[in-house]
Amino acid sequence: MERFKAEKQQGSGELVVKLAGHIDEDATFNGLDLNGAQKVVLELEGVTAINSCGIREWIKWIRTAPNGAAIVYKKCPKVIVDQINMVAGFLPDNGKVESFFVPYYSDESGNEKMILFQEGKEFKGGELFPPPEVKDEAGAQMEMDVIEAKYFKFLK
Amino acid sequence: MTVTKKIINFETYDSLLEEGIDRSFDWQQISVFDGAEPSIVLGEAMGQAASHILQNTDRHFAQELNSSAIMLTDQLAFEKYPLSIILSPGVDPVSNEPKLQILSKNFNSAGQKSEVLTSISEALDNLAVQSSLKGDILVIADELITNAIYNAPFVDLENCLPGAPRDNRNIKTPEAKAATLLMGRDSNRIVIGCKDQYGSLNFQKFLTRVKNCYDAGVAATMRMDGAGGAGIGSFMIFNTAMSFYVDIKKGVHTSVFCVLPLGMSNRQRSAMPKNLHFRFSK
């Protein structure tokens, strides 16, 4: 299991926090002070898992962002999208998802693939514009492997 | 999901019981639904109308029914051979149990959690299960281990206390009271479970908490204060599993086993209705 890792980069008024690994009771958000940021960008591609303690710690931490700060979640893996849909406050009211991964699956080959959906391209204003065709490495047709009403709930 | 309907003509299912299965149980202990939502399944269990809540739309309905019959008639079989009773209830469990088992790990400290999860992850890689299924199994395993280390030894029987602080990395219970994580499979299903030696799970509270997550939402149910559990781990386990088995002997042991289907897309898996089996051993 990949351990939790966090990296913080301060730009002009923009704080970029890169999170990776398993977010659980051992994950510490203490060094990731969000005070003073006008915009917080979370890069989440490397997050592999999150447990119940991790969810609680995340919510406590994200609540420390200043009121009025824009919060942007980028490259959310499925584990993060699931929590956004399931746990109110996991994505705060002033937060938005700029991009996220959607699992695709081929019944024929059993292969899986994650496709990045980006705002303005694959989704816009609550509407979806999925790629017309997704194939695996062997050329087998792949289908979106989620229940759409559940997985894209957060876009509405 | 299909329309929920509780089936009351139990005799219809008698022919699905394997030869040699003891039929001297009370059929009222088995509720059969036609694709019921999780909240209805949990409500049925809370009312104690039945201890085995099954879905006849499940492709493994016959096995679920046979497992129920064994759990209702044999006090020891599930305790000794859980994998066999779950996956192939009609087969001799003594010889079958080792064939089904992939992994068995004892643990008694917080420091061992990562090592146990790594073993599970490696075992799943060897089986070449899909990555989304692997993720689901690890979610269940994480919560089961956390519960066995931080909750089972420390909560009272009413489960009023939230367990040991999660930031205490030195939590350790006596080796003789170690918990066991077990994983097994057949060609269609995979089972992951954990048995602790405390028997402190208050099942009515468990059901209430999980049902509340479905009815009122996860955030409304979550414990935000204190350093104990967040109170949603049980929901994460139940919500991820297709079938859920609990066996509690107060003060002696709690066994929780979850079943997930193999070779299915994430979408099909998420749409499957849930079965729930529980038993209080004497």
Image (spheres, grey):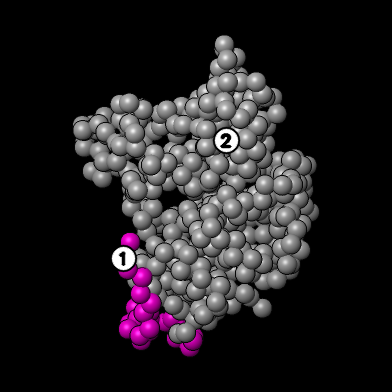
Farthest front residue?
A68
Residue drawn at the location 52% of the way across and 37% of the way down: A93
Amino acid at circle 2 = His
Q: Is residue B2 visible?
A: yes
* Most foreground residue, A142 or B251: A142
Instruction: Tell me if residue B183 comes above or below residue A38 in the rendering.
Output: below
Between label 2 and label 1, give the one nearer the viewer. Answer: 1
Query: Gap in Å between the C-alphas at discs 2 and 1?
Result: 36 Å
Q: Which residue is mark 1?
A: B2
* Snapshot quadrant of residue A109: top left
Q: Which residue is mark 2?
A: A22
Mark seen at residue A3: none
Q: Is residue B15 magenta?
A: yes
Amino acid at circle 1 = Thr
Q: Position of residue B86 (x, y in %)?
A: 47, 66
* Most foreground residue, B97 or B219: B219
Alpha-carbon neighbours of circle 2 within 10 Å: few (<14), some, or many (≥20)? many
- Chain part drawn in magenta: B1-26
- Relative horizontal placement of residue A49, taking residue B269 as reference (left or right): right
Q: Secondary structure at mark 2?
A: strand
Residue drawn at the location 36% of the way across and 70% of the way down: B4
Are circles 2 and 1 on residues that touch, CB within 8 Å? Answer: no
Q: Chain of mark 1?
A: B
Alpha-carbon neighbours of circle 1 within 10 Å: few (<14), some, or many (≥20)? few
